[in-house]
Amino acid sequence: MPKLRVLSGMRPTGKLHLGHLVGALDNWKQLQDEYDCFFFAADWHALTTEYAATEIIRESIQDMMVDWLSVGLSPKKSVLFIQSRIKEHAELHLLLSMITPLPWLERVPTYKEQQQELTTRDLSTYGFLGYPLLQTADIIIYKADKVPVGIDQVPHVELSREIARRFNFYYGPVFPVPDPLLTEIPKLLGIDGRKMSKSYDNAIFISDPPEEVRRKTSAMFTDPNRIKRTDPGNPDICNVFSFHKVYSHPETVDRVNRECRQGTIGCVEDKKQLAETLVAYLAPIQEERARYTRNLKRVEEILEDGCERARRVAAQTMEEVRAAMKI
Ligand code: TRP
């Protein structure tokens, strides 16, 4: 049995943080052993929101690739590449645009939501409306079977299913219909209790040095009803405890749970322990980061090789597409 193909992308819009790790990369890493994996930097997608100041994109691609490699995405197991180097995505996007009814794009929930949320940018562009269609091209050009994404991206995968079917209906069977691969994602909020995000300035970055990790951890919000150290706390509503559940030894999780409820461990002490756990967790990743950062030529070689492998697959699909469409 040939392996099923998995494909996913990430927009390079800044340094990666722990939210990216639990939300995507930890999962991608696991998938590498079971599937034929394609992972890429979606730099054209980043342009839909960063078009007015594009420098951040190129810097972030390199940072992001170094982060991917350092956390264990492996060029031996996966095809790692950059979207804009595979021009075939653009050709397929254009061809698909001919058969995409506008209302299908207008009703994608992220379209209106993001326009309302990102008020500092004008997102009334053709490119932004077409975002999920470009994503469709990314997915089906590799004939991906499974697309690991968070819940917010499921409507985009739904669109790619509808477009794949519509293409096959008009021109004959070329594309498999992809499935979203939803994974249970532990909830890790930023240090202020909002969603972890670079733009909220509340993220713990993979590249943060130990002092920074300690400083940020000590600033984390805990159970707001716990005023004195001896007050019994409620770990269920404490973000620090959520972090423990992801990063600490099960025995520590049990002990902290007990001692917090009894009021025998203070939040300050608790956060100190968490900080040391995070520092220890990040240490080997940062060692790898330093290694790759010293050898960026190697990173570029890995990317060139990945792009080459991606391009071969994409070019083959486009031959089939042109033949099916008789162009
Ligand atoms: N839209 C995705 C995100 O913001 C990134 C992305 C672009 C993607 N193309 C993709 C994800 C194709 C999966 C498959 O997270």
Image (spheres, rainbow, N blue to C red):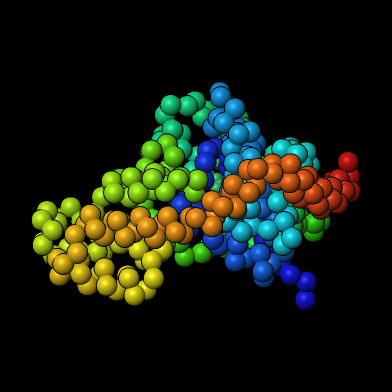
Q: Nearer the viewer, residue 124 or 166?
A: 124
User: Which residue is pictured at 41% across the width and 63% down the height?
Assistant: 247
Can see residue 132? no
Can see residue 255? yes
Tell which residue pokes out farthest to the top in this image: 52
User: Which residue is pictured at 13% across the width and 58% down the height?
Assistant: 229
Query: Can you say whether 77 is above or below 304 in the image?
Result: below
Residue 325 percent location from the top left of the image: 84, 46
Residue 97 percent location from the top left of the image: 70, 39
Quadrant that contains the C terminus? top right
User: Which residue is pictured at 72% across the width and 56% down the height?
Assistant: 75
Q: Nearer the viewer, residue 301 or 275?
A: 275
Task: Locate residue 247 relative to residue 153 in the image: left or right.
Answer: left
Question: Residue 82 lies in what quarter of the image?
Answer: top right
Residue 35 percent location from the top left of the image: 69, 67
Task: Locate residue 79 relative to residue 107 in the image: left or right.
Answer: right
Residue 64 percent location from the top left of the image: 59, 44
Question: Residue 228 lies in what quarter of the image?
Answer: bottom left
Quadrant that contains the N terminus? bottom right
Task: Locate residue 195 relative to residue 259 in the image: left or right.
Answer: right
Q: Nearer the viewer, residue 1 or 218?
A: 218
